[in-house]
Amino acid sequence: MVMNLNVFKYYFREAGASLLRNSWLSIASIGTIIISLLILGSSILLILNVRYIASTVESSLEITVFLEDSLEQDRRERMEEEIYFIPGVTTVHFVSRAQALDELRTSFGERADILSGLEEDNPLPDSFRVKTKEAETVPAAAQQLAELSGVEQVRYGQGVVEKLLALTHWVRIWGSITMGVLGFAAIFLIATTIRMSVFSRRREIGIMKMLGATNFFVRMPFMLEGMFLGLGGGLVAALMINFGYLSLLSKVIVTLPFIQLISDPTSLYQVLGGLLGLGFAIGALGSAISLHRFLRV
Amino acid sequence: MIQLYNVSKIYDNGVKALNDVTLHIRKGEFIFLVGPSGAGKSTLTKLICREELPSRGQVVINGRSLARMRKRDVPYLRRKIGMVFQDFRLITNKTVFENVAFALEITGASNKDIKRAVPAVLRMVGLEKKAKMLPAQLSGGEQQRTCVARAIVNNPVLILADEPTGNLDPETSWDLMKLFMDINRRGTTIVMSTHAWDIVDSMKKRVVALGDGVITRDEESGAYGYES
Ligand SMILES: Nc1ncnc2c1ncn2[C@@H]1O[C@H](COP(=O)(O)OP(=O)(O)O)[C@@H](O)[C@H]1O
Ligand SMILES: [Mg+2]
């Protein structure tokens, strides 16, 4: 196959001219690609973030044991030992009601003034913070803790982790379904665009074949046309996700400081690169299907 | 150079366009294909450039059977055959120069080769001054000469012309014939189907007459014939 700059220029020129000629269909197919990739991209980021949050919650997973108000000092000390004997428990840490209020105040940061006045009549109980070796042992340990005398209430993750993971399960299912449907629509629209291009240029194609153009030469501009559409859609979607996510990050940091989102650029760029690549693949696939069906040379 | 052995062509709709045709074309010949409409002249042309395959028999070019030629080799066969049609088949949004250059572009020729070869053939067909014009701005004769320039720019060994003068007035037709004789004198074989009896009669070339898909006459320096 002879390949030179001249031929490349020809391919690109023809592909570009075709895109302009079918501009409405081109816009429709790019739009569909953008929407399907936006859904895919945001689902992926959501899932990744939920996993990330789940893992950070999990690592600090601890059981809080609230104690009855009237508990005596020596009962409390015996209780600490009893807790140590519960299987799976690694650390036990006493938090007085005053310390608890201090922590609460710190976590509220600038808005701590909401809590002013509580010092006189602190509603928080004394508590033990109990850590276990693994997240799986938490429920069993919590149950044994609740049975100890002098314990008012036992609290742990309260299914936060499970709820988050269940959410990702649904996001994954619905994200895949909508992405799949829209992905098919995008491939179909690209195939239609290419088909229209082939149709509007069938006379030229006939002349090219008469002159001895190879199949590769006849097909290449149409192939490129589809790839451009896919790449264009992928690029727009990647940029939108990029800026959307960055502005979300900056908002979350201000308003929900205790939530930690994925913010390292490499993970983000991997997702964006994936979107770009997928857009390209959709474009290439759409035009390949169309050429296979409508340009039997 | 070209041999047809007992070639029959039956189209998908059952029309028998050619029936047991055997014909040998030597290198450098100038052949007129004559006969009434529907006789099978265009079909014969299409078999030679492998636009159609014979239903029976063999078409052999330079010792190669076209039926056994691989599909991906067909473009390279076509580059050795220059084709000229009644309806010109120019690309309407390309200039004369670009139309001729296109035949080279598709072969992957370099810009340098194109800039050298195209003006030369345009000069040969007398269109060097019209290089920048679009087909719609040309007369029928000029469009046909553009088509001839495109057909010869790849130095083909054979020119297949299917009623090339069908849309031209008599004077322009003669200009085209002079051009074809020029090209033929340089060694290119020419097979031309035509209804222009005056041209055939005065050129005294080989005449192959077709009627209802069979060869009814094959004469050296023949005449159009009036029996049909
Ligand atoms: N693609 C085709 N499909 C079916 N029939 C065809 C086709 N091309 C030509 N024919 C028929 O074959 C016969 C010969 O046609 P053609 O070779 O075009 O004759 P000519 O060029 O001498 O006028 C005609 O009856 C024509 O209708
Ligand atoms: Mg005909």
Image: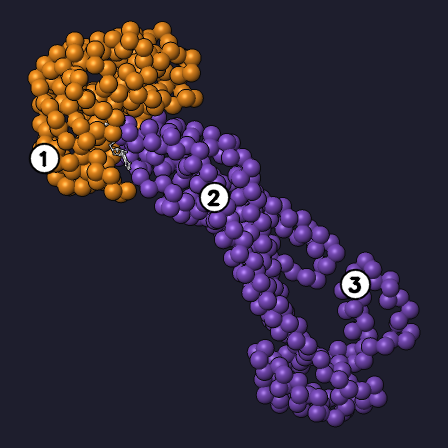
Residue B5 tag number: 1
Q: CA distance from mark 3 to mark 2?
A: 57 Å
Work out whether A138 lies above or below B151. below
- The image position of residue B17, as x and y in percent, is 21, 35
Q: Judge: label 3 CB < 8 Å from ligand 1.
A: no
Q: Colour of chain B?
A: orange
Give me the residue at 71% from left, 88% from top: A146
Q: Are marks 2 and 1 in contact (CB under 8 Å)?
A: no
* Quarter assignment of residue B31: top left
Q: Which quarter of the figure is the C terminus of chain A placed in?
A: top left
- The subunit carrying tag 2 is A
Return the disc, 3 or 2, that comes first in the chain's sequence.
Answer: 3
Task: Name which residue type carries label 1.
Answer: Tyr
How many residues crowd mark 1 within 10 Å: few (<14), some (14–19), many (20+)?
some
Give me the residue at 36% from left, 19% from top: B98
* Quarter assignment of residue B222: top left
Q: CA distance from mark 2 to mark 1?
A: 44 Å
Residue behind mark 3: A108
Mark closer to the observer (3, 1): 1
- The subunit carrying tag 3 is A
Colour-to-chain, purple: A
How many residues crowd mark 2 within 10 Å: few (<14), some (14–19), many (20+)?
some
Q: Judge: label 2 CB < 8 Å from ligand 1.
A: no
- The image position of residue A131, as x and y in percent, is 63, 79
The colour scheme used here is by chain
Residue A262 tag number: none
Q: Are marks 3 and 1 in contact (CB under 8 Å)?
A: no
